[in-house]
Image: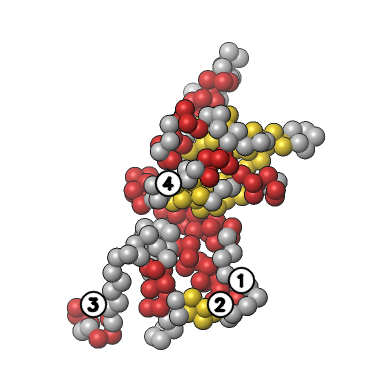
Amino acid sequence: MPLHRNILPDIDVTDFAKLILNYSTDGILLADSAGFVIAINKRFSKIFEIPASEVLGSNVLELSKQGAWSPNLFQRVVQKKKTLSIIQTTRSGRSILATGTPIFDDAGKLLYVLFNDRDMSLQSVLENDSTDSVELAIRAAAKSEHLVAETQQYTLNGIVVKSNIMKKQLNLALQVARFPLPVLLTGESGVGKTMFARFIHDQSPRKEGPFIAINCGAIPDQLV
């Protein structure tokens, strides 16, 4: 059996690109340098719940203003001139790991911005078994958005934070709160695990529901 074979010369590259585009598990959007949408795939329409007819030819800035997703990533990619990832929220409340990649010509002129959008909602995670993707999303979100200032004391929900280490932990808690997944907090007694748990709850989409703190130390070992 041959280990490889020659590529047939009559392969239609356009058809090949369409095949990849429409069978990708990520949503894909291609915009020109001004932000006007040139192409999207079927997965994009499904994730954002927007028909292609409303997206093609529209400007990504206007679509973002209309609430299709938030925050907008296009301007950041254009300004930074490099690939960036953030967590976006769709109109229906889905959490999306969005990655924007600028595409330049040989002279360094911006031609397009390519967006990859991965649905990080619990249903999608369970369907695609993408636990690693959730970890990737949390890390990307924590790096892309510095929500707590690094130079001053920060107080929120009763948590007073001064050290950079604790500010990083609070940033991570803010990002984790966006995902409908179980969170395990570890640490010695009295370090503030319950306070952090309440903080995550209050920053999550489930904040209108009850928060129940259980003191496991008061429960017999055989019942825990």
Q: Identify the residue at horizontal 48%, vertical 79% (top origin).
A: 159
Q: Residue furthest right?
A: 107
In the rendered image, which residue does mark 1 sit on?
149
* Disc sitting over residue 154 in the figure: 2
Hey, what amino acid is under mark 2?
Answer: Tyr
First in residue order: circle 1 vs circle 2: 1
Where disc 1 sits, the SS reads loop
**Front of the two marks 1 and 4:** 4
Instruction: Give yes or no for contact between labels 3 and 2 (Cβ–Cβ under 8 Å).
Output: no
As drawn, which residue projects farthest toward the top?
10
The circle drawn on residue 224 is 3
Whether 8 is drawn above or below 33: the answer is above
Q: Residue at x 37, y 59 (%)?
A: 205
| Placement of 105 over or under 70, stated as above or below | above
How far apart in space, not on screen, are marks 3 and 1 (Cα)? Answer: 39 Å
Say what secondary structure mark 4 lies in: loop
Q: CA distance from mark 1 to mark 4?
A: 29 Å
Q: Quadrant of the C terminus?
A: bottom left
- Residue visible at 56% across and 48% down in the picture: 72
Please name the residue shown 54% across and 35% down the image. 29
Do the residues under discs 2 and 4 have CB atoms within 8 angstroms? no
Tell me: residue 128, above or below residue 153.
above
Mark 2 vs 4, N-terminal side: 4
Residues under numbered marks 1 and 2 in contact, where contact means CB atoms less than 8 Å apart: yes
Q: Position of residue 166 (x, y in %)?
A: 54, 76
Residue type beneath disc 4: Arg
- Residue topped by disc 4: 91
Separation of disc 3 and disc 4 at Cα? Answer: 40 Å
